[in-house]
Image (cartoon, grey):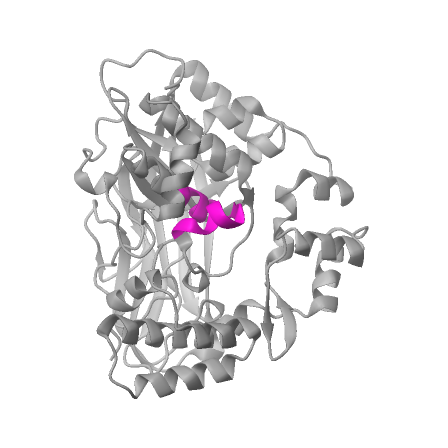
Amino acid sequence: MMNIKQCVDSLSMPLPEDILKRKWAGDLEGAIRAIDLRLTQELPELLRARLMCERERIRRLPTQYPWNREQAIAKLQELVPAMTAEEFDEWELAGRIDFIYIGGQKRYFVRFHRSIAKYPELMRKAGKEVSPVSEWLDPMMHEIKEKGSLSRRITLETSLYVDKEDFVPGQYLAHLPFPAACAQQSEIVLLDGDPDGIAAEDAPARTAHWQQSLGEWREFRLRYRYVSTIRYADPLNAPVPDAPLYPAAAPVCADDLAQSGAFIRFTPYLRSLAREIAGEETAPARLAWKVYEFVTTKVEYSFMRDYFQVDDLGDYCAVNLKGDCGLQALLFINLCRILGIPARWQSGMAVEPGYTGSHDWAQFYLEGWGWLFADCSYGGSAYRYGNAERHRFYFGNIDPMRMAANREFQAELTPEMHALRVDPYDNQSGELERIGAELPFTMRQLNGRAAMISCETL
């Protein structure tokens, strides 16, 4: 039986090279046969866990890469009709289009084309208007700066279900993210839903959960309300306040400077990069800014395959100079901790006009200021679109249109899952398992909804 925590922790170590060669050459069946042969032998405990974990990764991998080259070009041309095959190849060579080989054929990542909104040059090519001004973010940013704070009472409805064709009667455990009591969130109320329990308000990954025997398919749903309050911080220019901006935030602790799990690790490359970024700077606020500046100006936003499929998550952005909101936040945390600046993970959802979806960001600690925020994804978008004010704002601040459920990367859920989670690192969309099933669900088998029901300015 697989030890789940040991499986995930083992991903910090490499695969045996013959298995790795088969995997990336697209010989997935050969890689699995090689793994199965090794597992019949006496092995070190962590190596056995690594091989068992890799077997499950390979099983899930093809679901992430459905398109051949012709299909991939067609998907991109649906959004950017003027894109040529030659330009597609140039973007692939530049590392902007993710692919693998399966059975000798190149296959492309299912969501690669959705990154176009992050590239102003592609938006222009698609005939879209490109402006540095956001019609909803900039007014909110200005209000926070002018008033010093802004509170929103937000009501959300979320759900999770397995596709009906994949439902089998049995004993089920379901988790849906639920707002945590944290620096910026308060007045959390469950309005509708029938969970069997809700984790403690300070749980590292807070969820509402169900443990039920199901004879028929069902959708797990929640409706809840909370207040999100952001207080304006300008740690580069303003004097240090007399008291921390967020007094309810959990105090800084040793864990906020430590290595943790498989991917918050101070690798030789990250140590070297941190020294290079820091240069001669020693002031903590300036050091944190230099890290933020590196991540937001040197790392391009890119939709990612499941985190479970990514080797070296902690190094990924720094090596590939691309990544999504979570990998950018993880890089920021790693580099800050290496430089002696306490930093934490925070994630849940972004609540935008017409869209509610998964999002990750970071917190960092400065003496006097206390815990502040850094959203490298939103800041990087502002930088790419030429909005220097908004780029600066997301260093120290976020907007109140968030739902925060998690304060740790790779945190266990309560109660713990029996099988390997769809996402062993983050808790944004929920988790669902049929207890005792031979194989866990994949991300492609789970679906859900998230929608803002109301938002009131306080």
Q: From the image, which quarter does the C terminus lie in?
A: top left
Q: Nearer the viewer, residue 271 or 131?
A: 271
Foreground: 407 or 151? Answer: 407
Residue 372 vertical placement versus 59 (above, below):
above
Q: Main secondary structure of the magenta part?
A: helix
Q: Position of residue 234 (x, y in %)?
A: 39, 18
Magenta includes 324?
Answer: yes
Picture coordinates of residue 191, whole percent (x, y): 31, 48
Query: Does the image show residue 212?
Result: yes
Please tell me which residue is depicted at 33% across the width and 43% down the height of the picture: 345
Give the camera-side residue of 204 and 299.
299
Residue toward you, 148 or 346: 346
Q: Which residues are magenta?
A: 314-331
* Residue occupying the point 27% across, 34% down: 342
> Is residue 199 shown in magenta?
no
- Residue 323 image position (x, y, % from top left): 51, 48
Q: Quadrant of the N terminus?
A: bottom left
